[in-house]
Image (tube, rainbow, N blue to C red):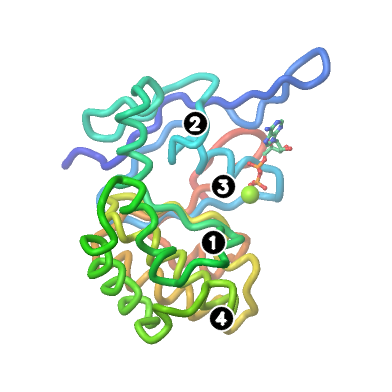
Amino acid sequence: MSQPVLEAIGLAKRYPSGTGQLTVFEDVSFQLQKGESVALVGESGAGKSTLLHLLGALDTPSEGRILFGDLVVNEAGEKALDAYRNSAVGYVWQSYHLLPEFTALENVIMPRLIAGESREQAAPQGLKWLARVGLADRATHRSGELSGGEQQRVAVARALVGEPQLLLADEPTGNLDDRTSEELIAQLFELQRSEGLTMVIATHNISFAERCDRVYRISSAALVAA
Ligand SMILES: Nc1ncnc2c1ncn2[C@@H]1O[C@H](COP(=O)(O)OP(=O)(O)O)[C@@H](O)[C@H]1O
Ligand SMILES: [Mg+2]
C-alpha cells in the first residue's frame, strides 16, 4: 500500500481546567490516504476544530505525533512549519476569514504574497483558482461586497492557491443557507476529486458526511470510525 499523506499517532489534546485538566480527546490515531475525503462529525464541543487545528499545525498536541511525509509536524521548526501551513495544507473556516477591504483576487493570492511571491507572479494563479470556483468575474470586487456563498468560494480558492495536498474544512457551510451550502459542497468535492486532494471536512450535515469516502466521529474523547 502507498504511504499515507498524513498519519496521526496517539494524539491527545488537554487544556488546564481549574485545578485539573480537560481532555478534549486522547489516543487518536488514523491515516489519511492520497485523494480520499474524510468527514469529521460529533456534537458541538466534541473537538472537531481542535483536531483540525492540530492537523493544520495551528496548535500543538499534548501527546502524540503527526507525520506528513518525512515531516514530523509536531516537532518541526518554525521555518518548516510555515512551509507546511502555507503550501502543504489549505484551510477553509466556517467564517471565511477574508480581508474585507481587499479584492477577491488579493485575498486569494495572499498566501503566495506572504510566501514571498510578487503580485505579478501570483496573480495568474489567483485568477486560475477564482475561475475554478466560478468567480473569474469577481476578481476586482472587494470581498466585503460579495455574498456569503461567494466569500466562501473565494476562501476555497485561497485555500487551493498554494496547490496543497491536504484540504482541511471546518464546517465550511455553517454560515450558508441550504441551497448555497449544497453548491459549495458540490464544488468542494469536484475540486477535491479533480485535484486528487486529501480532504478532511468537519460538518454537522449528515448528507455531506455520507458523501465522503469515510466518516469519523469524535465521541467521549475518542475518535471512532462511523
Ligand atoms: N483554548 C482553549 N482552552 C480551553 N478549552 C478549549 C480551548 N479551545 C477549545 N476548548 C474546549 O475544547 C472542546 C472542543 O472544542 P472544539 O474543538 O471547538 O469543538 P467542536 O469544533 O467539535 O465544536 C470544547 O469543550 C472547548 O470548550
Ligand atoms: Mg468547531
Mark 1 or mark 3, earlier in chain: 1
Packing grade of label 4 (10 A; few <14, some 14-19, many >=20) is some
On residue 28, the disc is 2
Q: CA distance from mark 4 to mark 2?
A: 33 Å
Question: Residue at label 1?
Answer: 99
Quadrant of the drawing holding the N terminus: top left
Name the residue at 64% across, 79% down. Answer: 177
Mark 4 CB within 8 Å of ligand 2: no
The amino acid pointed to by label 1 is Leu
Question: Residue at label 3?
Answer: 217
The amino acid pointed to by label 2 is Val
Q: Position of residue 6 (x, y in %)?
A: 32, 38
Element class at badge 3 = strand
Mark 3 or mark 2, earlier in chain: 2
Q: Position of residue 63 (x, y in %)?
A: 50, 19
Mark 2 CB within 8 Å of ligand 1: no
Foreground tag (1 vs 2): 1
The amino acid pointed to by label 4 is Thr
On residue 180, the disc is 4
Q: CA distance from mark 4 to mark 1?
A: 21 Å
Name the residue at 46% across, 71% down. Answer: 103
Name the residue at 40% across, 24% down. Answer: 74
Mark 1 CB within 8 Å of ligand 2: no
Q: Quadrant of residue 109?
A: bottom left
Q: Among all residues in the image, which is located at the extreme left?
A: 2
Q: CA distance from mark 1 to mark 3?
A: 33 Å
Foreground tag (4 vs 2): 4
Q: Quadrant of residue 84?
A: top left
Element class at badge 2 = strand
Packing grade of label 3 (10 A; few <14, some 14-19, many >=20) is many
Mark 1 or mark 2, earlier in chain: 2
Packing grade of label 2 (10 A; few <14, some 14-19, many >=20) is many
